[in-house]
């Protein structure tokens, strides 16, 4: 597939390519241009050229285009989901959820477009004030490979509705569904240049985009290291940033929780998308009195998970997205073994056998008896490995939950509303769930505190973050 700049399909200036492979089979699916600095500059120019007329449209007109695109995405959801599974690896049912989630986001923003207005302020007898919102200009979005469709929605919906134009750079392992979705937006009436997609390596096309002086804001989702680099580069022209940098979400299960429901929550929370989700359950704290039965049930349920090609009808968990990601997980588990940092009670290795030879599969893994300070708990483990710790009470659980440089999400599982309220008040996180984990509806602002990032996606918050106020004062 080709990049989309100014509404047309283009190869990179020097015709170099990136191969996109199926992580379950290693097969080549397609190739995309390895865009360079110069391609990023062309895309920003196209976005700049489209900016003037796009911002003059009413919000309702912009919303109608998002709405039409959402309709088309729903019509094509099976094909889009299949493509997503082929490039990303996740089971087809998860890809279908993700594609529908993308349509939900566009519809949410299309829906609120009818309710946007400014503010009128009376300034006594001698004057009145008017406050309106205006777009920032050309924005950039750099997205990762774990949830490429949903995260594209988080950026595209509010950026375009607010009247900005956009240059989007997908991850190099998962650009294909993003390009198809951009084409659908174009076919839904988006004027040429309003949304441009450049493919290419992060250090080249990505940095070229962030460095470009014509960009007013960059929205990034991915690793802490890359996020910090982007923030530094963006500071040179005082560009605004939204950074979603992952987390180490704790899940706390108290004695009065519904154990079976919590077991299901933990399995989905950790093994959904093979554990490659920023808000996955990355540390599990279970209260002592139920620990034995909870861990037994969790182990039983985990061992029933069917790991395989995401296109298979019975697959619960697909491969990791790349060899690099599987190596990171293997290494983390090997370090744990070598340093005697914990007990692996199930999993703990790659899958073997003919069906798994060419793919990046890893067994769903549970670890207990974790030594305090083990990297399995202090670092973000982006794969299907779940450390389970026991705690005497809620206070200790909250203290442990907060003992992290991250602060994205957290969940507490309990039937006591006071415990739930205490956890909500005291855990450092951008979102706290009670008796569930992972769900992020488009209405709910989402983002982290501390090491998990800056700014919010979703809801009115995201829309506001892609615009600024402009004030008028009138004297009589
Ligand atoms: P990165 O943060 O490096 O990649 C995310 C996106 O940023 C990709 O589009 C990538 O492009 C791009 N990028 C990379 N380097 C630069 C740069 N210098 N300037 C601009 N853009 C850049 O993550 P990785 O893919 O390397 O994953 C590493 C770890 O990051 C994971 O193990 C996980 O812990 C964490 N992560 C967290 C995510 C989250 O949702 N919070 C999502 C993905 C990863 P390209 O693909 O071409 O490299």
Image: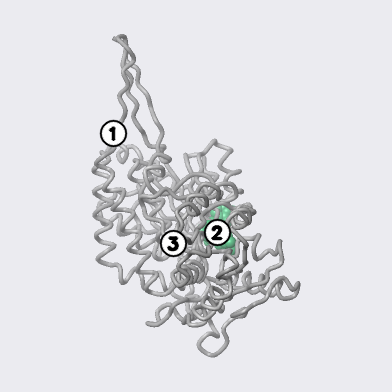
Callout 2 environment at 10 Å: few (<14), some (14 to 19), or many (20+)? many
Q: Which of the image's four quarters has the N terminus?
A: bottom left
Q: Residue at x 27, y 43 (%)?
A: 113
Secondary structure under badge 3?
Answer: loop
**Mark closer to the chain start, 2 or 1:** 1
Q: Give the residue pinned by disc 1.
A: 117
Disc 2 CB within 8 Å of nearest ligand 1 atom: no
Q: CA distance from mark 2 to mark 3?
A: 13 Å
Left or right for 330, reference 2: right
Nearer the viewer's eye, disc 2 or disc 1?
2
Q: Residue at x 68, y 68 (%)?
A: 370
Q: Position of residue 474 (x, y in %)?
A: 32, 15
Q: Position of residue 397 (x, y in %)?
A: 60, 58
Q: CA distance from mark 1 to mark 3?
A: 35 Å
Q: Give the residue pinned by disc 2.
A: 249
Above or below for 378 versus 341: above
Left or right for 430, reference 195: right
> Cβ–Cβ below 8 Å for labels 2 and 1?
no
Residue farthest bottom in this picture: 354
Q: Give the residue pinned by disc 3.
A: 436
Nearer the viewer's eye, disc 2 or disc 3?
3
Callout 1 environment at 10 Å: few (<14), some (14 to 19), or many (20+)? few
Secondary structure under badge 1?
Answer: loop
Q: Residue at x 29, y 37 (%)?
A: 116
Q: Is residue 16 visible?
A: no
């Amino acid at each position: 597939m080709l990049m989309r700049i100014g509404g047309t399909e283009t190869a990179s200036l020097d015709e170099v390519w990136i191969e996109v492979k199926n992580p379950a089979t290693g097969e080549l699916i397609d190739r995309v241009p390895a865009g360079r600095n110069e391609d990023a500059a062309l895309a920003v120019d196209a976005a700049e050229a489209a900016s003037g007329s796009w911002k003059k449209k009413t919000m309702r007109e912009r919303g109608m285009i998002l709405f039409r695109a959402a309709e088309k995405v729903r019509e094509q959801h099976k094909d889009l989901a299949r493509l997503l599974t082929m490039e990303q690896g996740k089971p087809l049912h998860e890809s279908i959820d993700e594609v529908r989630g993308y349509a939900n986001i566009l519809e949410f923003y299309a829906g609120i477009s009818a309710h946007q207005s400014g503010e009128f302020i009376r300034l006594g007898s001698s004057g009145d004030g008017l406050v309106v919102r205006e777009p920032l200009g050309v924005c950039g979005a750099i997205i990762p490979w774990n949830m490429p469709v949903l995260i594209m929605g988080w950026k595209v919906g509010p950026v375009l509705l607010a009247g900005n134009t956009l240059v989007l750079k997908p991850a190099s392992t998962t650009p294909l569904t993003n390009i198809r979705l951009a084409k659908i937006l174009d076919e839904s009436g988006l004027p040429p240049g309003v949304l441009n997609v450049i493919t290419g390596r992060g250090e080249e096309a990505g940095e070229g985009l962030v460095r470009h002086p014509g960009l007013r804001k960059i929205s990034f989702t991915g690793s802490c290291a890359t996020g910090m680099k982007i923030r530094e580069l963006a500071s040179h022209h005082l560009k605004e940033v939204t950074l979603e940098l992952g987390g180490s979400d704790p899940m706390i299960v108290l004695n009065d929780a519904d154990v079976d429901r919590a077991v299901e929550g933990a399995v989905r929370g950790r093994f959904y998308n093979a554990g490659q989700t920023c808000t996955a359950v990355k540390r599990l704290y279970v209260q002592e009195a139920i620990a034995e039965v909870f861990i037994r049930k969790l182990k039983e349920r985990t061992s029933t998970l069917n790991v395989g090609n995401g296109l298979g009808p019975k697959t619960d968990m697909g491969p990791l997205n790349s060899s690099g990601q599987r190596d990171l997980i293997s290494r983390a588990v090997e370090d744990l073994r070598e340093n005697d940092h914990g007990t692996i009670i199930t999993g703990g290795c790659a899958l073997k056998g003919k069906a798994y030879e060419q793919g990046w599969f890893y067994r769903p893994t549970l670890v207990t008896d974790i030594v305090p300070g083990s990297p399995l708990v202090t670092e973000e483990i982006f794969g299907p490995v779940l450390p389970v710790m026991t705690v005497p009470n809620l206070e200790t659980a909250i203290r442990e939950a907060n003992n992290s440089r991250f602060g994205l999400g957290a969940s507490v599982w309990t039937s006591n509303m006071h415990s739930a309220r205490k956890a909500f008040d005291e855990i450092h996180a951008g979102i706290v769930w009670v008796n569930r984990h992972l769900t992020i509806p488009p209405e709910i602002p989402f983002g982290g505190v501390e090491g998990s990032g800056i700014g919010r996606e979703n809801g009115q918050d995201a829309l506001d973050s892609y615009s600024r106020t402009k004030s008028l004062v009138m004297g009589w």
